[in-house]
Image (tube, helix red, strand yellow):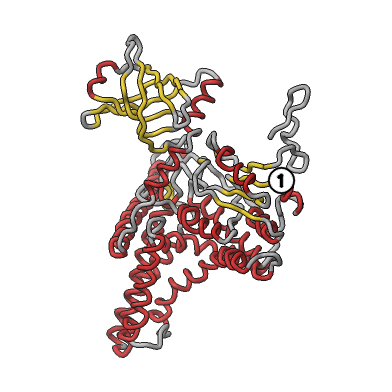
Amino acid sequence: MLQKSRTHQISCVNHGIEQGCGELILILDCDHVPARDFLKKTVGFFLQDPKLFLLQTPHFFINPDPVEKNLGIFRQGPSENEMFYGAVHPGLDFWNASFFCGSAAVIRRKYLMEVGGIAGETITEDAETALGLHGRGYNSAYLNEPLIIGLTPETFDDFILQRSRWAQGMIQIFILKNPLFQKGLSLFQKICYFNTCFFWFFSFARVIFFFSPLVLLFFGLRIYNASLVQVLAYAGPHLVAAYFLSNHLFGKFRHPFFSELYETIQSIYLLPAIISAIANPRSPVFKVTPKAVSLHEDFLSHLAVPFYLMLSTSILAYLVGIYKWVTAPWMADSIALCMAWNTFNIIIVLSCLGVVWEKRQIRRMHRYPTNETVELEFPGNETRGSAQIIDLSISGAGILVAASEHNRISDHITLHTTDSYGKQFVLPATVINSRQQGHQTLLGCEFQEDTPEMRTEIINFVYGDSSRWQLRGQERQAKPVSNLVGLFRILKIGINGSVLNFKGVWRILRRKVSIILSGMAASLIPGKRKKL
C-alpha cells in the first residue's frame, strides 16, 4: 500500500525499491498498461502463501509482431508468445519454476531485498533474479490470465534486437549460473531452468538443418550412411510422429511449421550473438527494444541479405543435384533425399523473404477487435440507438449501426456503455467516415479528448477491462490443424510473402534507375548543366 505523509504527498514514489514503502512491488514495462483489477487478482496469492516471492502474469500484445504484420497473418492464429505463456509457463508453474519475465509481475519486497534487489550480472536480469530467489527456497506462481496489454516490436530489426538480448542473457545464465549446479533448487526446478536456457541453442540446429542437404549436393559428402529405403523406414516414421505429437500437444498454441519459420528467421542473427556470449559471457550489454514505431512506407529491411543468399544457394543446389543425378546414378537415393529436404528449406526461406519486406505502419494507436453492445446518443434525439463496437483504440472505435438507425447518424455522437466491472462511461465522439457493410453501417469514430479527465476516461474504457483480453486469448487458441494443411498454409504464406518482396524490390530498383536516367538526361540538355 502507498503511505501518505501529513502533507498528503506520496512519500514512496521515485525513491527506488530500497526506500519504498509497499510490501509488494508491481513491475511493468513502460509500454504495458495494466487493467484496473490487476492487483485485485494478484495480491491474494501472497496472502495465501507467505513464502511466495513472485506472481507472474502473461504478456498480451495489441499489435502484430513483424512476422505476422509483414506476412499478413495477424489474428489468423495464435501469436508467437502464446506458446510460452499459454503452454510452457503453466508447465513451469507446475514444478514451482515460474520465473520473472520483466513485466506484468508482482514481487514481495523483503525477499527481493535479501538478494540485493534486481540482479544485474546478466542482461536477462528478470530470470536471473527469479533463479536466485528460487535457490533460497521461495516460491513463485503463474496466473494464466492476461491483465496487461502492451506492444511487441514493430520491425524485424527491432524483433531481432529483442531476441538477441534474450538469447545472450539466457546463455549468460547457462554459463555463469548454470541451473544444474545451483544450490537450493529442486531437481525439477533445475531441469526447468536448464531447458529454458538450453532452448536458445536452437540457432545451431537450424543453421545445420539448412546447410546439411547442401553439403551432399555441392560436395558429395553423405549426411546419412543409409539408402533412401532405410531413411524412409526409420527416419521417416520418427519425423512424422514427432510432428504429429507436437501438433497434438501444442497445436492450439502454435503449429509446428510456424515454429520452423520463427526459429529459422531468428537463427541466422542469433547464432553470432550466442557465439559472442559463449566466448565472453560478460560482454553483452542491455539494449532497449524500440516500440510504437511509425513506418510511413514499405521498405526492405537491411537484414534481408542472408535470406537472398540462402534462396540463391538453394536454387543453385537444384541444378547441381540434377547434374549429379545424371552423372552419379549410384548416389540417386541420397540426392533425392537432399533435394526433398532442400525443397522444404526453400519454402521456409520464401516466408523469411516476406518477413524482411517491411510493410508500412502509419497507425500509432493500434486497435484491437472486440464485440460489445453500446448505446448511441444522437444530437436532437432523446432516444438512444443500439450498436456494436467491433474494434477499439484510445483514438477511436469502429461501430456497427443497424440500417434502421442510418437516418439518425450525424457528425457527432455520444457513446453510453458499461464495462464488465459495472462502471459506466459516457464518451463523445466524432464520426470520421461511414460505409455500408451488408444491412448495417460501419462508423469510423474518433473520441473527443477535450479535457485531461476525458482522456483518462477513454483510457480506462479502452485498456481498463481485462475481460476483453481474456476472451480474445481464448478465441485465438484454435483447434490444431492437420500437418498437411499446415504445410500447405506455410507454402501459401511463403509464396505470397516472397512475391510481395520481389515486387517491392523491383519497384525500388525501377525508381533508382529512373532517378539515375533522369539525372543523366538533365545533364545532357543544353542550359541545364549549369543549373544542376
Q: In this orientation, which residue lies closer to the viewer: 495 or 531?
A: 495
The answer to whether 255 is drawn above or below residue 242 in the figure is: above
**Residue appearing at x 44%, y 74% in the figure:** 211
Q: Look at mark 1 in the image and give the residue it sits on.
A: 109
Q: Position of residue 231 (x, y in %)?
A: 35, 83
The answer to whether 487 is drawn above or below residue 213 in the figure is: above
Please state if 433 lies on the left or on the right of 9 as rendered: left
Q: Identify the residue at the far left of this view.
A: 439
The answer to whether 331 is drawn above or below residue 246 in the figure is: below
Q: Identify the residue at the far top of this view.
A: 380
Q: In this orientation, which residue lies closer to the viewer: 252 or 341?
A: 252
Q: In this orientation, which residue lies closer to the viewer: 476 or 449?
A: 476
Q: Amino acid at mark 1?
A: Arg
Please state if 280 lies on the left or on the right of 99 as rendered: right
Q: Secondary structure at mark 1?
A: helix
Q: Position of residue 105 (x, y in %)?
A: 60, 46
Please state if 432 lies on the left or on the right of 66 as rendered: left
Please state if 102 lies on the left or on the right of 261 as rendered: right
Residue 362 at least partly seen: no
The quarter holding residue 230 reads bottom left
